[in-house]
Image (cartoon, rainbow, N blue to C red):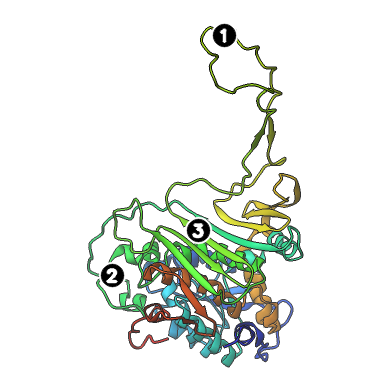
């Protein structure tokens, strides 16, 4: 499939759904939340504080998590939500108009597909999908059902980042030739944990869903499911997908790279984790490069231009460092060199550990949650600086959810800051990196809704799971 046809598949058919309800300006959207762990708790707290929404239902396979969610609503003096253990029952509830999904990665696609087929609009956590096949299915179902679906790449709703990316795309530092994503987060060992019986109040079968059945293990159930291939994608698909999406955004959101190459490993850890804690991936487009770096051990940040010391050099005729010949008169001391001149950023520079670097023909730039700075050429001349707003204006999750809720009411999918058709290609970069890492070689990509890897049948098998458990097929 040609690049133009591929782009139309991903981005060109974004159509607004016909309204199923006439919304008043002050009407609230009835939201159900699926998954009440760390990120799901944030969803609940954010929606319950927005004037545009009310939380009417909560769902989790863990009874303790549901109780925690109800307690959070009670602390805000809000009505008790309807509880569900099985998300399918929530999706069948006519009271629920939109669902917010904060499940583990391996559930992202199927939960969204079920919800959209049930007539619900969807806000889904990143990464958009667990693998490349599932992302294609999400896009297909969204188009068939014409539901509104936003992916939780909340940085795309921060005003200072929107302004910075617009400036880069308009040539602030010339033509971009490299966009870099950094994910430097210290991840300690999780140790070795034996399997145990499933605790009371936990539906382990529903937790695993599309993943293979295996005995209960606490480290596979809590946050650490990110580090196991059956349920997660490693840190590149956890924190790293945020920065990957921003790197792609700066380049104009291209769909498929021509090539992908990744290398890394699991270093400095003796534990049960499977995914790499160190990974570097590079992608080549027509004329640009995109690079992702994941480091899970102690490391320095980037984006601070190293100071350059400028001196006058040795005096004319000096024999720098040579000793005078025996019996020779001592050489006359050279004149004192001028004091070194420090060349570095004039303002407080960003030290990016989690964020992005951008390189252009006329300069370079750095961005993180602390701000954005662009410099002219190879110098330290600051040409643009943006800092995040304080308060609500700097709440990326709240702003992103407000954008979603506004589109639920307007039915204008084109106004979403990260619709599913755009978020899937960002997730796919993480999947391409993991595939390249796991097969141990680079990939030559033939673009299409489902890509082909030239001459690499082993890599092609990793586009989807070897098998899906019934009834959890995607």
The alpha-carbon separation of the residues under discs 3 and 1 comes to 57 Å
The crowding category of the residue bearing disc 2, from other C-alpha atoms within 10 Å (few below 14, some 14 to 19, many at least 20), is: few
**Position of 456 compared to 117: left or right?**
left
The alpha-carbon separation of the residues under discs 3 and 2 comes to 40 Å
Q: Position of residue 273 (x, y in %)?
A: 33, 61
Going from N to C along the chain, the mark reached first, 3 or 1, is 3
Q: Secondary structure at mark 1?
A: loop
**Position of 185 compared to 421: left or right?**
left
For the C terminus, the image quarter is: bottom left
Residue located beneath label 1 in the image: 328
Going from N to C along the chain, the mark reached first, 3 or 2, is 2
Quarter of the image where one finds residue 279: bottom left
Q: Position of residue 208 (x, y in %)?
A: 34, 76
Quarter of the image where one finds residue 230: bottom left
Residue located beneath label 3 in the image: 293
The crowding category of the residue bearing disc 1, from other C-alpha atoms within 10 Å (few below 14, some 14 to 19, many at least 20), is: few
**Position of 266 compared to 372: left or right?**
left
- Foreground mark, 3 or 2? 3
In the image, residue 248 above or below residue 117: above
Q: Secondary structure at mark 2?
A: loop
The crowding category of the residue bearing disc 3, from other C-alpha atoms within 10 Å (few below 14, some 14 to 19, many at least 20), is: many
The residue nearer to you, when weighing 84 against 18, is 18
Q: Position of residue 423 (x, y in %)?
A: 57, 75
Residue located beneath label 2 in the image: 200
Q: Secondary structure at mark 3?
A: strand
Residue at left 36%, top 53%?
267
């Amino acid at each position: 499939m040609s690049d133009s046809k591929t782009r139309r598949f991903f981005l060109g058919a974004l159509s607004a759904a016909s309204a199923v309800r006439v919304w008043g300006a002050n009407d609230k959207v009835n939201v159900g939340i699926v998954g009440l762990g760390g990120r799901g708790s944030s969803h609940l707290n954010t929606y319950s504080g927005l004037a545009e929404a009310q939380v009417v239902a909560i769902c989790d396979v863990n009874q303790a998590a549901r109780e925690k969610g109800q307690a959070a609503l009670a602390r805000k003096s809000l009505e008790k939500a309807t509880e569900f253990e099985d998300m399918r029952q929530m999706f069948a509830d006519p009271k629920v108009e939109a669902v917010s999904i904060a499940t583990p990665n391996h559930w992202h696609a199927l939960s969204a597909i079920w919800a959209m087929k049930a007539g619900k609009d969807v806000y889904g956590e990143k990464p958009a999908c667990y693998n490349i096949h599932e992302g294609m299915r999400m896009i297909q179902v969204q188009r068939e059902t014409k539901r509104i679906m936003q992916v939780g790449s909340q940085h795309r709703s921060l005003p200072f980042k929107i302004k910075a990316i617009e400036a880069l795309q308009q040539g602030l530092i010339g033509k971009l030739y490299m966009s870099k994503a950094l994910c430097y987060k210290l991840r300690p060992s999780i140790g070795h944990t034996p399997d145990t019986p499933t605790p009371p109040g936990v539906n382990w079968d529903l937790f695993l869903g599309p993943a293979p059945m295996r005995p209960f293990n606490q480290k596979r159930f809590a946050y650490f499911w990110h580090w196991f291939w059956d349920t997660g994608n490693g840190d590149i698909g956890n924190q790293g997908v945020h920065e990957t999406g921003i790197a792609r955004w700066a380049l104009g959101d291209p769909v498929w790279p021509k090539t992908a190459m990744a290398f890394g490993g699991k270093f400095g850890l003796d534990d049960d984790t499977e995914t790499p804690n160190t990974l570097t991936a590079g992608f080549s487009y027509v004329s640009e490069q995109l690079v992702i770096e994941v480091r899970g051990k102690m490391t320095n940040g980037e984006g601070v231009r190293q100071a350059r010391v400028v001196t006058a050099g040795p005096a004319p005729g000096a024999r720098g460092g040579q000793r005078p010949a025996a019996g020779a008169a001592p050489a006359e001391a050279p004149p004192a060199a001028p004091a070194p001149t420090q060349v570095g950023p004039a303002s407080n520079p960003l030290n990016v550990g989690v964020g992005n670097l951008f390189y252009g023909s006329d300069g370079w730039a750095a961005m993180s949650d602390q701000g954005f700075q662009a410099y002219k050429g190879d110098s330290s001349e600051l040409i643009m600086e943006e800092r995040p707003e304080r308060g609500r204006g700097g709440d990326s999750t709240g702003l992103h959810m407000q954008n979603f809720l506004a589109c639920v009411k307007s039915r204008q999918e084109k106004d979403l800051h990260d619709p599913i058709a755009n978020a899937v290609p960002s997730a796919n970069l993480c999947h391409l990196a993991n595939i390249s890492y796991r097969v141990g070689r680079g990939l030559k990509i033939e673009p299409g809704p489902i890509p082909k890897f030239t001459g690499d049948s082993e890599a092609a098998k990793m586009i989807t799971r070897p098998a899906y458990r019934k009834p959890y097929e995607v």
